[in-house]
Image: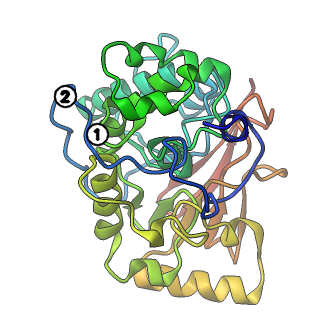
Amino acid sequence: MSAWLFAIALASCSGGPPAPSTEPSSPLHAPRAEPVSTPLAEAAPLPPSTYPAPARLVAIGDVHGDMDAFRSVLRLAGAIDADDRWSGGALFVVQTGDLLDRGDDEDEILALVLRLEREASAAGGHFVALNGNHEIMNAQGDFRYVTPGGFEDFASFAHGAERASHHDLPPQARGRMIAFEPGGRYARELAARNTVAIVGDTVFVHGGLVARQLDGGVDAINRAVRAFFLAEAPLPRALEAEDSPVWYRGFALEDDEVICAALETALARASVHRMVVGHTVQQQGINAACDEHVWRIDVGLARLYDGPIEALEITQDTVRVLHGAR
């Protein structure tokens, strides 16, 4: 691998979908659809794509590897106690993706989410973590936003599980590739999470939904991403495009007649009243656009951005912003 490619893998600048490359395929930038050689437990099934409206729902935006910020916003929501155990009872929590990258606590965060999914269910609540563009990027081997600590945390996966293709990677990146490549242990965990969820009259998605994405329905999007994580099929090109559900930024950046008309069409197609999105940091904190038909909840929780501790609460017909402290 060239020094240039490895520099791209370690960079932490913002960007969009990787541009098509004229260079030979590299494990850092190309999907690996072949399953890993080590036998793994069967992936859990996908949860439902659609849920009835709960009495109280709290939505949380991008976390990006910051456990302290994640813990703070979960406590603000009333979801966990001082021991990080589920305390929300029937509370419904939706996290809109991008648990990964930019921070050093990813393994702790993934373990906590997996446990909270079980504990919430046992208590009559729900914890729904969606897949964002950074979850998909890691399965594609795009490590542009991984920190040195993020490589170190998954280094143990390299021992005894490497294929010849992994030798094209710098040694520091091999464990992470094995952990997150399609069919790998963490990819299989991500395969058990949806990319789009509808709860009551609200649709939750990392980037945003435009009408054409809904031609096959929400279930089709979720199944396609799952198949990719399980190494059963390549990721469809439509899910890598700039207007894909995990990459689209239009509803997070604009509030004009054209954007609001596109939003209205998408909401009608999904048969919902509002959309909640992450993906694009809102310097002014959580805010709404298009007559509150879209809420933008990525406030830069991670210490990299040092944004506020905020979450969005939906109770029946009331939507409000929760404010906390670090």
Q: Amino acid at mark 2?
A: Leu
Q: Residue at x 44, y 75 (%)?
A: 272
Cβ–Cβ below 8 Å for labels 2 and 1? Answer: yes
Structural distance between the alpha carbons of marks 2 and 1: 9 Å
In this picture, residue 62 sits left or right of residue 234 = right
Vertically, is 226 above or below 50?
A: above
Q: Residue at x 77, y 76 (%)?
A: 255
- Snapshot quadrant of residue 251: bottom right
Q: Position of residue 172 (x, y in %)?
A: 57, 20
Q: Residue at x 36, y 53 (%)?
A: 194
Instruction: Residue 285: tell me if it is visible.
Output: yes
Q: Position of residue 192 (x, y in %)?
A: 29, 44
Label 2 crowd bin: few (<14), some (14–19), many (20+), radius 10 Å: few
Q: Residue 40 got which mark?
A: 2
Label 1 crowd bin: few (<14), some (14–19), many (20+), radius 10 Å: many
Quadrant of the drawing holding the C terminus: top right
Q: Residue 183 got which mark?
A: 1
**What colouring style does the render use?**
rainbow
